[in-house]
Amino acid sequence: MSSLNPTLITFFFYIIAMVFIGLMAYRATTNFDDYILGGRSLGSFVTALSAGASDMSGWLLMGLPGAIYLSGLSEMWIGIGLIIGAWLNWLLVAGRLRVHTEVQYNALTLPDYFSNRFNDHKKVLRIVSACVILIFFAIYCASGMVAGARLFENMFGMSYTTALWVSAIATISYVFIGGFLAVSWTDTIQATLMIFALVLTPIVAVLSFTDTQQLTIALEAARPQAMNLFGDLSMVAIISLMAWGLGYFGQPHILVRFMAADSVKSIPNARRIGMTWMIFCLGGAVAAGFFGIAFFQQHPEYAAVVSANPETVFMELTKVLFNPWIAGIVLAAILAAVMSTLSCQLLVCSSTLTEDFYKAFLRKNASQKELVWVGRLMVLLVSVLAIWMAGNPDAKVLGLVAYAWAGFGAAFGPLIILSLFWKRMTLTGALAGMLTGAVMVIVWKNAFAATGIYEIIPGFICATIAIIVVSLFSKAPEQDITDRFEQADELYKASK
């Protein structure tokens, strides 16, 4: 146990630092707007890194390296699709959403934006979108809980259940205390830690070989197809992997970072910072899984844990390659990835329950202090639900993320894009698209998974068609709806 003490100490100080930041954010949180959107005060650097860190969850250091370890570079198509999707999201959605949400009566959440954008007086769109968020985020939060539990289980020999609670409490604490500012500030630190770990680990793994020939021989002996970018993949499989990029347009925890930027002028610089960070991180995750194939072929005495669960390849590489003090810092990056995404997901769920249910239906005149505390209680409620869903120790991180990612991408992606670019879009069109996308993902996942087509593809296509067709057959939007759209459009163009 003594050999683990340095790692334990590093982890302990890391968690204490995150909670301390939460306390600092608590002092800066004066109202509900601050708690769930940071008062729209994030600069380009924090916007970029918090968007990246909230995007790249535990799957970046567990699911993706594990997939590469099993199948080789053919799994890289996920990363390629994500890079293209993220760049287009920054380019097409970020600035427009920042302006439109403010013009639409300072909307603080996506359901709030949808409701205001289409004059949803009956609040049907608000309720349905809030339900979609809660359903798919429950799955997404569960993936973060599983990833955190795997880390603590692997590092400290805890039982899965104990590890699940310990990792969850570490994240819940600073979200509960500090809200959005705590999440954004900690995301910036966590993003820095993640890129450090993902660049350093593959380099050290390569340096453990005497030369490139030894590395190549080990790779070919373990996985002859590892270096083949196409592997045994069909065109359908490649398109399905790249289709992950479509999901970016509908992820509430990423879109809320755009809404919180201090101005549209911050977006281009944030895009450059965010995309550079993302490319390095995805490249490092791929490299860790890829070189892990050769390393564990060369050192079979360390391979038992990875063979049993490939998603531990990054953890096992770190434990073998670094001394315990450095390993503690590098492995804290996995905790950072888990905490950064899970924290913002909990906050989005909390803000949805508070703003779109509690305030909208139960307490319209609730004070700001009351809303902040209700938001904190909602963080606890969602956390307990996610812990319950993550109770299965056989759950796979990448599988849970894929389902939730597709759900949001199909339900909200077409809706977000068309609401920002097409003023003829109607309330019934928005509702039809959202329901079509969400239902199609669930149906395809459960009935047509054998086709090999990732469920986001039929979901996204059908949702887009539903929005356009139903909008064109619906009564044209009211004048004040189109006036606000044009006002936001003009403000966006003027602010570039």
Image (cartoon, rainbow, N blue to C red):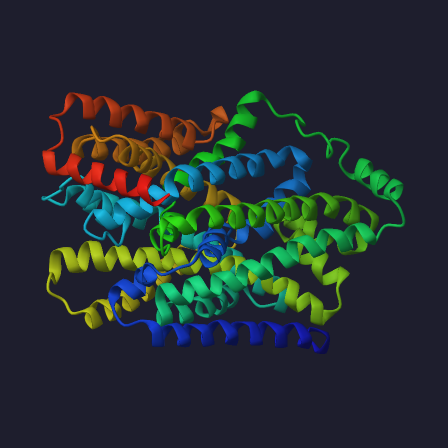
Residue 231 position by quadrant: top right
Extreme residue toward the front, this view: 494
| Residue at x-position 20% and y-position 46% | 126
Quadrant of the rendered image containing residue 159:
bottom right
Position of residue 474 measured from the top left corner of the image (x, y, whole percent):
14, 25
Identify the residue shown where x is 83% and y is 48%: 298
Question: Is the residue 159 above or below the residue 464 in the image?
Answer: below
Count of marks, rendered view: 0
Q: Would residue 381 be seen by someone viewing this image from the given angle?
A: no
The residue that appears at 30% across and 23% down in the rendered structure is 465
* Residue 408 picture location, percent across and down: 36, 41
- The C terminus, quarter of image: top left
The answer to whether one can see residue 380 in this image is yes
Which of 267/378 is in front?
A: 267
Relative vertical location of residue 215 with respect to residue 207 in this rendering, above or below: above
Asked whether 121 or 292 is in front, the reply is 121
Query: Residue 263 placed where, x, y %?
Result: 36, 53
Q: Is residue 26 left or right of residue 312?
A: left
From the viewer's perspective, is residue 459 above or below residue 86?
above
The quarter of the picture where the N terminus appears is: bottom right
Relative horizontal placement of residue 210, taking residue 467 as reference (left or right): right
- In the image, 170: left or right of 438? right
The residue that appears at 42% across and 51% down in the rendered structure is 266
- Residue 170: x and y in percent read 47, 69
Q: Quadrant of residue 349?
A: bottom left
